[in-house]
């Protein structure tokens, strides 16, 4: 089904822009204005490249999923690793985008409609969305939600600027302003926490949905790269609003941290920003956009998880019994995970999200190095892939929910940094020796699709 470019852009934006650029950006604001640099630089140099490459590779492989694409360019072993990571990430995304909106809805409704009730209601919606054809749910309503999401970001940004005289605005600085900076270094924690606002592996799992609807390859830059830039702008809006709204007059972010530490703190901080800057009515309208975008991303996450299982085990998804046998266990697992502390779930989601993005960038680098006469094109993917490798491995070593080297203090930081850099260097060397330096096949024999060819399937 071919759709117009603006509609494809809005669907892609709603697919990828869940709570990541909102909750992640607000949490990232705890480190101070340095979060701006990561959101801007990450979006333009890493996230945009990641989304464009994953979308175009899917288009050039007849709408194949990112797991199949990874297997084609990095081998069968990496394909299986990608399948596991992709499946785990998609379930985590579904959980994050289920509990988050439930918390927001609980703040707007009577007391008996608490978080648990809304979680079950959203879970039922996810069940229906996982089974019904995409054109009956996504294509009809996403443009409306997309417009709401954009209007919400515009409203919050304008209100933040208009109210700047009533609240202290931090001067730009790269200093770590986290309330407990000695245990919360900017590298790698902020780079993982911000998540979707700068780069997100989750986006690669959503690209095949839209890549199958584009008229031609020329639309890819607008739809895939453009949607990531739009998400980066949304993240900037919420990071700026959080710093302006919650930052204390003494220059510390302890007010924001106290709010985030409360159960459902992210939901409460979003509610406080919306109603505080836009008033009761304007805040309620903005909250609709904040609630809609994660719910719509969550339903496509569970759909994509189902597709990975179908592709992996060669199952027939046309049979209702087969679809139910996959959808029900996935949703039950998601509900069980939703009972865990939300902050812990968010951190696991963020790490798996950035790690999957790292693998996708290496896949894109492999494609560019082996499919064009000028293999130096691969550097636009290899450089951010190496960077994200260091981020992911360093976080794995340092974070309390992983190897927990944070307990060793400065020694733990030193060990984590060293291991992260070493692993990134090893990945780079493997890429150079096994992919970049190996002889290329005939360029003409490898190019199956010419840029600009109409994709009319």
Image: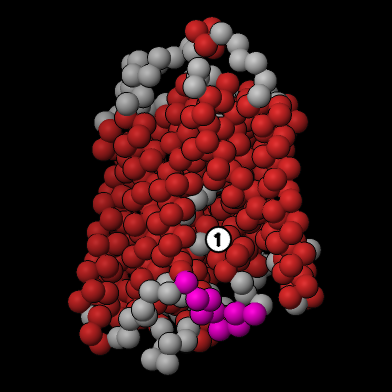
Residue 177 lies in the magenta-colored region? yes
Taking the spot 23% from the left edge, 74% from the top edge, the residue there is 161
Q: Is residue 64 visible?
A: no
The one nearer the camera, 109 or 176, is 176
Q: Is residue 221 visible?
A: yes
Of helix, strand and loop, which one carries label 1? Answer: helix
The one nearer the camera, 104 or 203, is 203
Q: Answer with left or right where residue 283 lies relative to residue 174.
A: left
Q: Residues within 10 Å of mark 1 (few under 14, many from 20)?
A: many
Q: Mark 1 — residue?
A: 191
Q: Answer with left or right where residue 84 lies relative to residue 6.
A: right
User: Taken as a whole, is the magenta stretch helix, strand or loop?
Assistant: loop
Q: Answer with left or right where residue 291 lies relative to residue 158.
A: right
The one nearer the camera, 66 or 30, is 30
| Above or below, comparing residue 161 to residue 427 in the picture | below
Taking the spot 39% from the left edge, 77% from the top edge, the residue there is 243
Considering the image in quadrants, where does the N terminus appear?
Answer: top left
- Give percent across and percent down for residue 177: 51, 79
Quadrant of the rendered image containing residue 311? top right
Q: Which residues are magenta?
A: 174-182
Taking the spot 50% from the left edge, 86% from the top edge, the residue there is 254
- Give percent across and percent down for residue 295: 45, 54
Taking the spot 47% from the left edge, 60% from the top edge, the residue there is 38
Residue 52 lies in the magenta-colored region? no
- Give percent across and percent down for residue 255: 47, 87
Quadrant of the rendered image containing residue 320? top right
Considering the image in quadrants, where does the C terminus appear?
Answer: top left
- Give percent across and percent down for residue 160: 27, 74
């Amino acid at each position: 089904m071919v759709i117009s470019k603006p509609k494809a852009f809005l669907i892609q934006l709603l697919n990828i822009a869940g709570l990541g650029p909102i909750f992640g950006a607000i949490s990232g604001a705890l480190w101070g204005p340095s979060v701006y640099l990561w959101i801007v630089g990450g979006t333009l140099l890493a996230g945009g490249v990641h989304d464009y490459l994953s979308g175009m590779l899917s288009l050039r492989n007849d709408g194949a999923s990112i797991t199949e694409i990874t297997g084609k360019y990095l081998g069968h072993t990496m394909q299986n690793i990608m399948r596991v990571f992709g499946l785990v990430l998609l379930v985590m995304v579904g959980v994050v985008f289920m509990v988050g909106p439930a918390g927001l809805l609980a703040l707007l409704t009577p007391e008996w409609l608490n978080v648990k009730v809304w979680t079950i209601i959203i879970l039922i919606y996810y069940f229906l969305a996982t089974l019904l054809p995409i054109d009956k749910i996504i294509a009809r309503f996403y443009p409306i939600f997309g417009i709401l999401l954009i209007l919400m970001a515009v409203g919050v940004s304008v209100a933040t600027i208009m109210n700047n005289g009533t609240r202290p605005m931090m001067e730009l600085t790269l200093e770590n302003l986290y309330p407990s900076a000695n245990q919360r270094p900017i590298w790698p924690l902020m780079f993982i926490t911000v998540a979707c606002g700068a780069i997100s592996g989750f986006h690669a799992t959503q690209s095949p949905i839209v890549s199958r609807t584009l008229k031609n390859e020329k639309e890819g830059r607008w739809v895939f790269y453009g949607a990531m830039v739009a998400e980066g702008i949304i993240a900037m809006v919420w990071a700026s609003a959080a710093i302006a709204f919650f930052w204390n007059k003494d220059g510390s972010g302890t007010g924001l941290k106290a709010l985030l530490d409360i159960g459902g703190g992210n939901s409460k901080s979003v509610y406080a920003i919306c109603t505080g800057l836009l008033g009761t009515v304007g805040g309620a309208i903005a909250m609709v956009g904040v609630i809609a975008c994660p719910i719509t991303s969550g339903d496509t996450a569970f759909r994509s998880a189902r597709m990975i299982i179908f592709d992996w085990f060669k199952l027939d998804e046309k049979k209702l019994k087969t679809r139910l046998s996959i959808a029900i266990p996935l949703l039950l697992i998601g509900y069980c995970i939703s009972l865990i502390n939300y902050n812990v779930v968010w951190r696991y989601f963020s790490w798996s999200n950035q790690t999957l993005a790292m693998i996708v960038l290496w896949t894109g680098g492999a494609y560019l190095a082996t499919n064009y006469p000028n293999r130096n094109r691969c550097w636009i993917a290899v450089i951010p892939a190496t960077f994200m490798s260091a981020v992911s491995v360093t976080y794995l070593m340092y974070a309390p929910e992983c190897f927990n080297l944070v307990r060793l203090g400065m020694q733990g930081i030193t060990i984590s940094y060293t291991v992260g850099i070493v692993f990134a260097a090893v990945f780079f060397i493997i890429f150079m020796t096994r992919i970049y330096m190996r002889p290329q096949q005939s360029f003409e024999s490898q190019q199956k699709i010419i840029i600009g060819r109409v994709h009319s399937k």
